[in-house]
């Protein structure tokens, strides 16, 4: 289960409104899950618990994603001795991007990764040939290209 500044803000807002539960994404906007709010605790689908103080951590560090594990939050990042690079998952309004040694793999200042993907696909549409995914990111463009190609095959 992954918490971002966006989902943490949604949970704290629900608590302010005295709601008994809130619906947020725990998988980076793929789906929604219900989180129970019980006094000062936020209870997740697998019975993990976080408190209000813990949820302030992702809000302060809004450029990171956090894993909910053992009733605590762990920043999703790693350093590779093999590549000598630092990898970090970075949240956005829609889909996350990955940052490698401080360089983001998607344009995020003027658009989201999904908007960037849509623009790339529109620039090369219609896709009539084979698309080679060269493993240059999280796969958004390759997935969108494959969906466009399948749609194009069905239409022609």
Image (tube, rainbow, N blue to C red):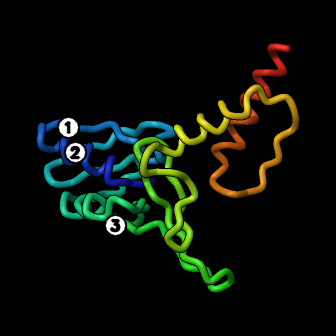
Q: Report crowding for label 1: few under 14, some 14 to 19, many 20 or more residues within 10 A (C-alpha).
A: few
Where 17 falls versus 38 (above or below)?
above
Give the residue number, with chain letter if any, for mark 3: 72
Q: What residue is at 73 percent from the left and 36 percent from the top?
A: 145
Give the residue number, with chain letter if any, for mark 2: 37
Which badge, 3 or 1, comes first in the chain's sequence?
1
Total number of numbered discs in the rendering: 3
What whole-number distance in Å separates the C-alpha atoms at marks 1 and 2?
5 Å
Element assignment for label 3? strand
Numbered circle sitting on residue 150: none
What whole-number distance in Å separates the C-alpha atoms at marks 2 and 3?
16 Å
Q: Report crowding for label 2: few under 14, some 14 to 19, many 20 or more residues within 10 A (C-alpha).
A: many
Element assignment for label 2? strand
What whole-number distance in Å separates the C-alpha atoms at marks 3 and 1?
21 Å
Element assignment for label 1? loop
Contact between marks 3 and 1 (CB within 8 A): the answer is no
Q: Position of residue 68 (x, y in %)?
A: 40, 60
> For residue 40, which quarter of the picture?
bottom left
Contact between marks 1 and 2 (CB within 8 A): the answer is yes
Q: Position of residue 70 (x, y in %)?
A: 39, 67
Which badge, 2 or 3, comes first in the chain's sequence?
2
Which badge, 1 or 2, comes first in the chain's sequence?
1
In-image side of 4 versus 113 (left or right): left
The residue nearer to you, when weighing 129 against 146, is 129
In-image side of 147 versus 80 (left or right): right
Q: What residue is at 73 percent from the left and 57 percent from the top?
A: 135
Farthest residue toward the top? 155
Give the residue number, with chain letter if any, for mark 1: 20
Q: What residue is at 56 percent from the left and 42 percent from the top?
A: 116
Q: Report crowding for label 3: few under 14, some 14 to 19, many 20 or more residues within 10 A (C-alpha).
A: some
């Amino acid at each position: 289960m992954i918490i971002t500044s966006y989902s943490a803000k949604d949970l704290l807002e629900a608590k302010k409104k005295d709601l008994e539960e809130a619906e947020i994404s725990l998988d980076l906007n793929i789906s929604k899950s219900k989180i129970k709010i019980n006094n000062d605790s936020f209870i997740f689908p697998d019975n993990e618990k976080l408190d209000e103080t813990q949820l302030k951590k992702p809000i302060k560090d809004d450029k990171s994603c956090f894993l909910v594990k053992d009733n605590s939050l762990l920043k999703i990042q790693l350093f590779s001795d093999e590549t000598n690079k630092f990898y970090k998952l970075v949240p956005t309004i829609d889909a996350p991007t990955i940052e490698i040694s401080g360089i983001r793999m998607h344009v995020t200042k003027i658009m989201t990764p999904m908007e960037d993907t849509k623009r790339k696909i529109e620039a090369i549409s219609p896709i009539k040939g084979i698309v080679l995914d060269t493993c240059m990111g999280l796969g958004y463009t390759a997935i969108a290209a494959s969906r466009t190609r399948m749609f194009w095959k069905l239409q022609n």
